[in-house]
Image (cartoon, helix red, strand yellow):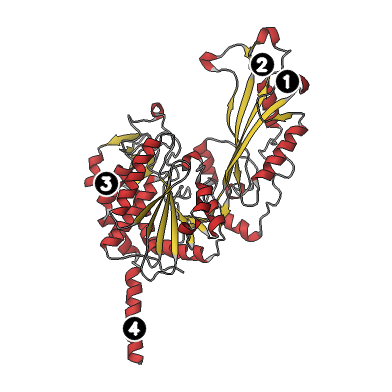
Amino acid sequence: MRLQALTFFLLFSFAIHAQTPTRAQLESMTEAQWQPALSLLTEIVSMPNDAVFPEQIEVNIQWCEDIFEDRGWSVERLETAGIPLLLVEKTQAAATKTALFYFHVDGQAVDISKWDQPDAYVPVLKAQNESGNWEPIAIEKLQSEYDPEWRIFARSSSDDKGPLAMFISGWDALAEAGLAPDYSIKIILDFEEEQGSPRLPAAVVEYKEKLKADLMLIMDGPRHTSNEPTLSYGARGIADMTLTTYGPKVPQHSGHYGNYSPNPALLLSQLLASMKDADGRIVIPGYYDDITFTDAEREIFSKVPDNEPAVQKRLGIGRTDKVGETYQESINYPSLNIRGLNSGYTGTQATTIIPATAVAELDIRLVPESDPNRLFELIEDHINAQGFHIVSEDPTDEERMNYPKLVKMEKSVSYQAFRTPMDSDAGAWLRKAMNRAFGKDPVQIRISGGSIPISPFVDALGIPAITIPTVNADNNQHSPNENLRLGNYKEGIQAIMSVLTQPMY
């Protein structure tokens, strides 16, 4: 009986070892998969994917269906009132746990006049010259050469098709080695993330049973600016607001009516300026209520290896807002950002007028402690206190005559923030996987500054969620010349293989 038990133990230990390759083995498998992985990356980024054009997205949906079906995954479209979500699933025999991965496949719009290449959907390999400029090199070089600093320039190369290509390539490498996770996998593919995922929250509730899992893993967003392996335990949510102030019913000659007709641009500027102090802190009463940090949380902030002088130099800013004592602390507060202003004309089109309207687009980055509807109420109270009358539509003639200071407010909430405790079982499990992949602990970020639509899953499914960012921080996501560093692509494949072979807690 003891001999049988010993034999079982040895066989069991061998099976576990076979499922948890070492760092050297992970690197070897990544290298063996490198050429197919490069081909997959160039293929996936070559498909236009602006969700404003559903016909573009349909091509991407069909590509995803084919790529997973070819690998033996089940595939199902989850219909919504618009563009569907795609759920792909791989069930492992005897698995007791399920991980739900999230990727988005759509990308930001392209203004090709701002790109340094003819087509943002034709990937270009580039190397940086001594002057710091990126120069194209023959993409065929990738068949025989490798430099981790080379980059693929294409829309969605980093946000978020590159990470999806990392996952697929990692899966293929493990399959060739005869390895598989000890847990089942579901993947939700979102094709409207860059449009705010407007139908996602309702869909998560509707398809709650199909999406059921034990934890959620998100492969989106950049690593820490040090480019060290990173885990992020949350992300801020996002809401937006549009404010419009009014002057004369139509633009007026600034000579005839200057000093007489109120200027809506000045009114709006005064209103916006009243919301923050000279150090960038929001002065609206109650806006930062419930935001406090323990000594342990401040220690978490201090362990993130931020080089703030280098960041400020890269951004070209000689000072910073004083919302928090450090960068990490600052992104743990809700924000109020002016993302765009418009009134009258500038440049060669400038005319001597008093504009009819002025418009400010604002976004609010949310943290778990901040209820967006409460923040909206606080902003409204503040606007009223500045002597403005708030309307929801363009004012009538009667309203114009009765209220000297008018502002139209339009607002919406995309999704809330989420945050998973660092000391959770899911966090410990991922740290083990990342340490095995890279031989060191990852940088750990309490909450990232950007927003991803994960809180609907966390709320509806009641599961923890953690982000595994893989791409380079200077990838120009959402901007012209988006790119993916080859070293990050290779290490991303290595990271996902380690996660997929880490025995589930």
- Give the labeled residue for mark 4: 8
Q: CA distance from mark 1 to mark 2?
A: 9 Å
Amino acid type shown at disc 2:
Lys
* Relative horizontal placement of residue 236, taking residue 84 as reference (left or right): right
Residue 342 drawn above or below residue 285: above
Binning the other alpha carbons within 10 Å of mark 1 as few (below 14), some (14 to 19) or many (20 upward) gives some
Q: Which residue is mark 2?
A: 249
Counting residues from the start of the chain, the first of labels 4 and 1 encountered is: 4
Mark 3–mark 1 Cα distance, whole angstroms, equals: 61 Å
**Which label is found at residue 400?**
1
Rendered residue at 69%/46% (across/down): 288
What's the distance in space between the residues labelled 4 and 1, CA to CA? Answer: 84 Å
The residue mark sitting in front, 4 or 1, is 1
* Distance between mark 2 and mark 3 Cα atoms: 58 Å
Disc 1 on helix, strand or loop?
Answer: helix
What secondary structure is found at the residue carrying circle 3?
A: helix
